[in-house]
Amino acid sequence: MCAASARSDSVKQLLWPRSWAALGHRRQRTAPRISLPIAQTFCRASTALAVLGLALACLALGAPAPRAQPAGGGKPSAPTKELIAVLDFEIVGGSKAEASAVTDRLREEMLKTGQVTLVDRSQIEAVLNEQALQQACTSSECAVQVGRILGVRRMVAGKVTKISDKLWQISAQVVDVETTETLRAETVTFEGRYLDLLLTGVSELAAKLAGAAVIPSGPAARGRAAVLTDPTGADLILDGQAIAQKSDALLDQLPAGTHTVVANKGSLTATANFIVNPGSLTRVELKLAQRQASLHVNSTPLNATVRLDGQEVGRTPLVLDVHPGEHTLEVAREGYQPATGTVVANLDAPTTVTVTLLEKDAATLEYEHDRRMWKFNRNTSFYGGILMATIGYLEARAVAKSNARQDDLQAQALASNNVQQRQSLVTQIATERDLGRAYKATSQIGYVTGAIMLGVSIWLQRHPPEPPAASGKSSIQVSALPFGPGGAPALALRWSW
């Protein structure tokens, strides 16, 4: 381009008519012309400088930005807090204001944990209004939709249920916006006033949710727990591992989260689950109770009814937790001979008892039928005799009252001077005399029938049906019998018939 301009100026100089000056025309004064070689060199240099500047600019844009060095000796900065959003909770059985207060309180408590950063409530409301989601957004699908618009990775949604004025339930879930999975679902049931719910129940829920809302990074936070037992001096097992400390004990440097502690002292035991919050002390109280022994009851055939100490506890096969000591065990099934025995169990190990029930023969079944009929006839005769004797007694009292009324009516008839009134009284006396005779007959029938039925009941009681000759008894077998101190069996079975 520059070369073409210089060449054009040179052509104009060669073709400029010199005669124009003689004709009186003045040429416009122009800048001094540059020769063609100099112009070409200048243009080439300018183009080279422009290309070099463009290359330097491209390198500057593609180079990584210098990292800011943190203060304090160049140590790396702490990881950023996870940004989450808490949706307004749904209310069931209460007012919207109560649910709003619970949601605000939950946001405050989650911020206090120092583990999360919350999206401003106005931004959430703006998204809900824009997406026409003015109703309560509590489902995971709705939470994921709002979370993607807000640009967060975790969403918290839930509802508040007012069961009564002093019984509340708060349920919440933490949803991963990217995977649409529910990371954690927590439910807190609180018994007390609404104000206490805001101060205590919401704090517990916030601690649980904050731990699930943060994307794990770096070492886990830790806390402490004080384990107190009644009585003290119990051996402790924490999360399945025995520890050297005995109760009452202060456990330090526990990872935040849920733990299980078991306390044992002799035959006493107790188990509790507790939650450790970062940087806080959790108090765990356990009331030790008598440890239970395990008793496994099997039978041939299965589905036999099991009674322990006179109470039905289920059907075989059955696993029972029983107090150490002596118990009465009964195993029975329809059509089979029952088995009854005494079980002495301790805490050393589970014990399996297998009972073999023998099927009843025809003679036994006939005997059981006769005995059922015998019991029915005996009881019917006894209670029927009592009933008939009672009827006879009541009718005898009715006879006495009828005789008294006859005497009263007869006295009135003798004292009356009115002929019509006297005839009326005589008619009443005759009617009452007939009733008295009927009462007397019924009373006699009741007494006689009652005496006969009671006599039959006494005779039946003295003459029960004869049982058949024994053809075999149900048997038991004890397997894996543990031994107690000194080699004595930990379980003894003494069967009685």
Image (tube, rainbow, N blue to C red):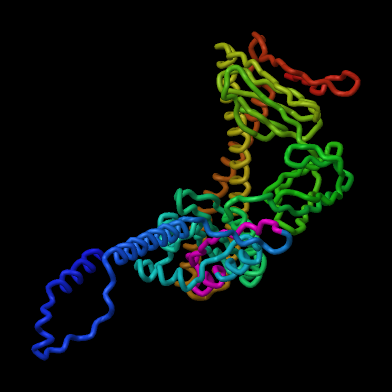
Q: Position of residue 280 (x, y in %)?
A: 75, 59
Give the tally of numbered discs: 0
Which residue corresponds to the image point at 76% horizontal and 42% vertical from the top-left?
238
Asked whether residue 18 is in view, the answer is yes
Q: In this view, does 48 lie to the left or right of 258?
A: left
Give the answer, above or below, for where 254 lies relative to 58: above
Residue 403 visible in the snapshot:
no
Where, by quadrant of the figure, is residue 468 drawn?
Answer: top right
Q: In this view, does 25 lie to the left or right of 375?
A: left
- Horizontally, residue 31 falls left or right of residue 45, namely left
User: Which is nearer the eye, 417 or 331?
Assistant: 331
Q: Residue 106: horizontal and vertical position, in percent?
A: 59, 66
Q: Residue at x 16, y 73 (%)?
A: 12
In the rendered structure, does residue 95 fall within the stretch colored magenta? yes
Query: Horizontal and vertical percent for residue 176?
Result: 49, 52
In the foreground, 6 or 385: 6
Q: Which region shows up in magenta?
A: 74-103
Pick the residue in front: 401 or 36.
Answer: 36
Residue 232 belongs to the span the image colors magenta: no
* Residue 122 on image: x %, y %: 47, 73
For the N terminus, the image quarter is bottom left
* Residue at point 44%, 71% (across, down): 125
Residue visible at 26% across and 74% down in the picture: 33
